Image (spheres, helix red, strand yellow):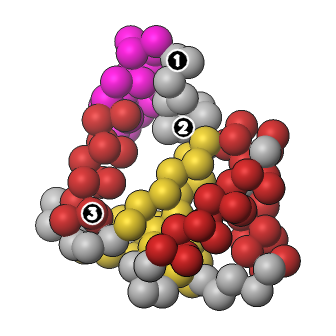
Amino acid sequence: IEKILQELCDSVGIKYQKHKSFNLGFQYHQTDLFIEPNICIEADGDYWHAHPDYKPDKIIHYAHKNRKQQTAKDVRTKDKKITRSMEKQGLQVIRFWGREINQEPEKCLQKIIKIIKKS
């Protein structure tokens, strides 16, 4: 889904940087696409980022070695914390769900263009 967003941006000449890293204080985070001066675009896979259709107690990541089990609620909480921390740094964060990117790519592109024009 990241590649689809990249191709959409390429098709209209939007310049971006892939996987720009930000120090959020509690962790580093690489945004999927970064558009100058301050736009971060996240391509959230429906499963890995716990789409709202998933019940909060659905297990997304099972416990493995040094990683504890995470439910959909845990994943959503972490993503919200990341978004808030990025916004506190003056970044605009746009999150797209995988199904949104796959089913309505043009709508996603128009949203990106609209945000660029505002900034």
Amino acid at dot 3: Glu
| One can see residue 28 in this view | no
Toward which corner of the image does residue 45 lie, by quadrant? top right
Amino acid at dot 1: Tyr
Between marks 2 and 1, how big is the CA–CA gap?
11 Å
Residue 119 image offset from top left, x and y in percent: 44, 79
Residue 114 image offset from top left, x and y in percent: 59, 67
**Residue drawn at x 42%, y 24% as measured from the top left:** 72
* Callout in the foreground (2, 1): 1
Residue 16 image offset from top left, x and y in percent: 60, 83
Other residues around mark 2 within 10 Å, as few (<14) / some (14–19) / many (≥20): few
* Callout in the foreground (3, 1): 3
SS label for mark 2: loop
Residue at mark 1: 54
Q: Residue furthest left?
A: 25
Q: Is residue 67 magenta?
A: yes
Q: Is residue 3 left or right of residue 119?
A: right
Q: Is residue 68 magenta?
A: yes
**Residue drawn at x 54%, y 37% as measured from the top left:** 48
Residue at mark 2: 48
What residue span does the magenta drawing correspond to? Answer: 55-75
Q: Is residue 27 left or right of residue 75?
A: left
**Residue drawn at x 33%, y 71% as measured from the top left:** 91
Residue at mark 3: 87
